[in-house]
């Protein structure tokens, strides 16, 4: 675990790019552009995140041990060998669960205010 971070709660709250990337990687190993597409599909915005924002987040998540490079490779005819694939780590899964619980608790705490659209 990175220095000064001893528990999943030490990583929260997550930035939006990190949260969205971890959600994308929670079910599949993906390369950067596939992460961007997944986020855009889920969130419904285009372009969503910029590539520079995403790759900065990827660099930090690797440093923090939330994701790692993956050896996964699809069929060579469907892939570019220069692509790097990423996977969520066990720590990343714990942090994502912790963040989801934090967000759910926050939503519940304001739910009674009638702020919904």
Image (tube, helix red, strand yellow):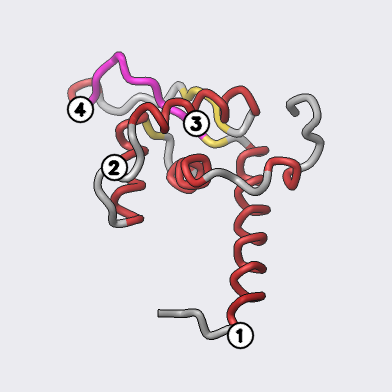
Q: Which residue is mark 4?
A: 78
Q: Secondary structure at mark 3?
A: helix
Circle nearer the N terminus (4, 1): 4
Q: Quadrant of residue 14?
A: top right
How dense is the environment of label 4, judged by Cα within 10 Å: few (below 14), some, or many (20 and up)? few
Distance Cα–Cα, label 4 vs label 1: 49 Å
Q: Nearer the viewer, mark 3 or mark 4?
A: 3
The residues colored magenta run: 79-87
Which is nearer the eye, 12 or 95? 12
Residue 37 got which mark? 2
Q: Nearer the viewer, mark 2 or mark 3?
A: 3
Which is nearer the eye, 81 or 9? 9
Residue 57 got which mark? 3
Q: How many marks?
A: 4
Residue for point 38% across, 34% down? 30
Distance Cα–Cα, label 1 vs label 2: 34 Å
Q: Which residue is mark 1?
A: 112
Which is nearer the eye, 36 or 73? 36
Q: Secondary structure at mark 4?
A: helix
């Amino acid at each position: 675990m990175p220095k000064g971070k001893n528990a999943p709660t030490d990583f929260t709250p997550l930035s939006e790019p990190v949260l969205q990337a971890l959600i994308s990687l929670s079910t599949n190993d993906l390369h950067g552009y596939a992460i961007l597409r997944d986020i855009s599909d889920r969130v419904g915005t285009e372009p969503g995140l910029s590539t520079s924002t995403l790759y900065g987040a990827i660099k930090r998540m690797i440093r923090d041990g939330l994701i790692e490079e993956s050896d996964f490779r699809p069929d060579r005819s469907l892939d570019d060998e220069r692509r790097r694939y990423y996977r969520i780590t066990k720590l990343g899964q714990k942090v994502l669960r912790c963040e989801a619980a934090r967000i759910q608790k926050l939503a519940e705490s304001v739910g009674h205010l009638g702020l919904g659209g």
